[in-house]
Amino acid sequence: MRRRDFIKVVAGSASIWPFAARAQQSAMPVVGYLSAYASDEGETRLAAFRRGLQEAGYVEGQNVAIEYRWAGNQIDRLPAMAADLVQRHVNVIAATTTPGALAAQAATTTIPIVFEAGSDPVRLGLVANLNQPGGNVTGVNNLAVEITQKRLELLHELLPTANVMALLINPADRALAQVQTREVLSAAHSRGLKLHVLNASSEGEFDGVFADIKRLRVDGLVMGAGSVFVRSLNKLTALTVRHAVPTISLWRDFAVAGGLMSYAPDVLDSYRLAGTYTARVLKGDNPAELPVMQATKFDLVINLKTAKALRITVPTSILGRADEVIE
């Protein structure tokens, strides 16, 4: 072989190998992971999702690829991100958070969607039926919104003489805001309580919220669900302590950081289950026939140190039901 011909063969091989490697990589099924959170805030949830995939035999980079779309708590970015995943023809969209699930559903009726969300998927219109979803969508409901009413009940049990309560919601997250408001208003009415619905869509609005709480003479605060509150949990915790506002949150970290109490589902297990359902869809299961899973375990955490600082005596009826007491 002449030297010139040898160089042509080597050059041709060099161009073929990268192409072959890309082809092998693209042969992997691709999961589109859509979240309302910022990437650094969603790390523990993502780890749980990956664990679910792995339990079913899928390891990222080995036999499955994942395309990530993080909205950074800017919910209005989710529709475009969902549309981009559809254009990339991913095999399944793992739509985490309720806004993510709704954005994915609006973007496609053909690509399978597995959600991890915090509200009734039938009421949201994600599925027709919990046992037989009937379309291209199924997933896990962690019931975070449904137990907002329960959080009001627990707070009132702790503060039996309270007359005025407040609910903090993010109005930009319309689906969650509407359901939570309806549920908590109903619970407040049945208990003869006055309820103020307070709005915050960004951390910059929190100081104004607590000024309103003082002005309205609120006895206790129920913190609603929403990614913006997760991102700013430390600041919200500090504000409840500084202003001495008895507050119940959806997240255990709130009580651990010094908040009064939390009542929450095991969200990490919900993400793990979403991972296993995503794996089942990748293996060929039809989402229309995969029943929606729902959270079954909820943890009540009470910070006794904070209760004492607020001069609140926690009754034994509540202490006996607590899964964790921080002293």
Image (spheres, rainbow, N blue to C red):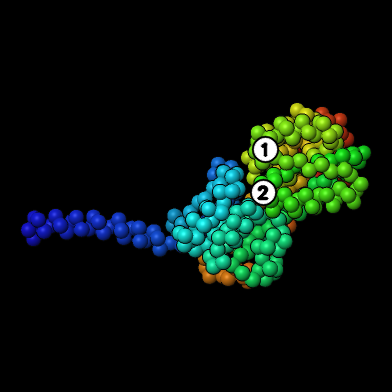
Q: Determine crowd level at label 2: few under 14, some 14-19, many 20+ residues with C-alpha closer than 10 A.
A: many
Residue identified by numbered label 1 = 233
Q: Which residue is mark 2?
A: 173
Q: Is residue 10 above or below residue 312?
A: below
Q: Choose top left, top right, bottom left or bottom right for residue 246.
A: top right
Name which residue lies at 80% across and 34% down.
Answer: 213
Left or right: 201 in relation to 276: right
Query: Against 325, is 114 above or below?
Result: below
- Expressed as whole percent of the image width and height from the top left, the position of residue 309 reads 82, 29
Residue that appears at 49% across and 56% down: 84
Does residue 70 appear to the left or right of 145 in the view shown?
left
Q: How far across and down, in percent of the image, does residue 106 sit? A: 59, 60
- Which SS class for mark 2? loop
Residue nearest the viewer, comparing 51 with 104:
104
Residue type at the position of mark 1: Leu
What is the count of numbered marks? 2
Q: Position of residue 231 (x, y in %)?
A: 63, 40
Q: Quadrant of the N terminus?
A: bottom left
